[in-house]
Amino acid sequence: MGTAPAAAGGDRLSNLPDCLLHSVLSHLRSRQVVHTGLLSRRWRHLWRAVPCVDIHHRDFLDEPEPEPEPEAFYRADGAFDAAMYDAHRQAQDKRMGREIMQRQDSVLPLNAASPLDAYRLHLGGDVHLRKGMGRWIRRALARRPAELRVACDYDHGNGYHRSSKDPFFSLGIFSRTAGVTSRLRRLSLSGLILFELFEEELRSECPVLEDLQLVNCECHRQSPGRLRITSRSLKRLAIVSSSSEARLCLTAPALVSLNVGMPVAVEEEMPSLAVASISCHAGVLSLLKSLRTARALELQRFTTCALVGEEPELFREFHNLRTLVLTECEIGDGCQVLAHALKSFPNLERIVLQDCMVMYLLPRVSLMCRQFTAIELWFNNLLPSSHYINNLLPSSHYINDYRSRGVV
């Protein structure tokens, strides 16, 4: 397992036990991991037992062939030959797809017995790369990973004309073997089209799933416009940049963190919820009532009416809330949204206005919550002066101005 002690100033890293070296190598991409086999005899086969596999299509390409000069694609009459250019690009993409398939097969052998801690696959948008996606995911699922991340650089377009070349995803189409997702705790999918079976697989075949992230994914189903997620174990859910027309039906009683930009119907209480980020949509007040236990809450693109007018007493039920973030929201003439929030949230400590329109002159309001400490203005391209809102609070409270993002 180890080697003889190295001479002073020599290679002490190689004297570490295999388990520590595997842990170090798990933080590298797979091509870098494979290259460590060239270091010495001690490292020759270490990479084969690394429990994390991270495949990025660009890492498995040889040095690209030099591109032909632009003049090569012009005919004798001086016109650009689009057909010749397309044929060149297709031949180049096919070669790239063959190389990646051959090299990833060696990185992720099918007959390996040890389970994976993580498998991460990032493919480009080329159709020839997507042809190998099912093969690689099947090999990964056979190793029963605790984490699965699949990302595809794919433009969904209008979504009305699907073909077999599109990046469809369902756990069942990659493996029929029972128990392959029994260890799966983290699942992250990006740029994929989810089969209708995906919803049932989450419910029945992922018993320990805790973290689910869907980025720019679309649902392919007979009854469009709905996505159902049911999980008794799920703790963190993020759905980003997906179809705004879809509606999420959510049953996740153990949920701790929720980040969605689509309409949500909560079908069971979430008593452990601590962090939430939602967008304004029809029926959003019903969703807000399900978020009463949150300690940090981000509201995106809310109107003044939604925040103040429809149910003015709603916010008094948020006894745990300490941080409120308003992103691209209407603050209202006279800044009544801020005044309403300060008076309504009983234990609020901090408000962040992120890319909100703030009036130059703001009224002074009395504070009902003594522990309140700061209002912060965050803008993408403009850092406003703090005197914009120094009339809002008594002098004992201070103002912070920041550019950074990611409050919740």
Image (cartoon, rainbow, N blue to C red):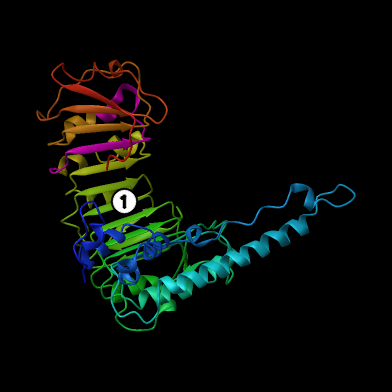
Q: Quadrant of residue 217?
A: bottom left
Quarter of the picture containing the N terminus is bottom left
Can residue 321 be seen here? yes
Residue 303 image offset from top left, x and y in percent: 36, 36
Q: Quadrant of residue 204?
A: bottom left
Image quadrant in which you'd find residue 335: top left
| 39 versus 351 height, above or below | below
Q: Which residues are magenta?
A: 319-338
Is 95 on the left or on the right of 254, as rendered? right
| Neighbours of disc 1 within 10 Å: few (<14), some (14-19), many (20+) | some
Give the residue drawn at x 34%, y 50%: 283
Q: Position of residue 257 (x, y in %)?
A: 24, 53
Q: Does the stretch in magenta take in 174? A: no
Is residue 313 in view?
no
Q: Is residue 321 magenta?
A: yes
Left or right of 217, for residue 283: left
Q: Position of residue 196 (x, y in %)?
A: 43, 71
> What amino acid type is highlighted by mark number 1?
Asn
Q: Position of residue 110 (x, y in %)?
A: 40, 79
Residue identifier under label 1: 259
Q: Is residue 188 above or below residue 180?
A: above
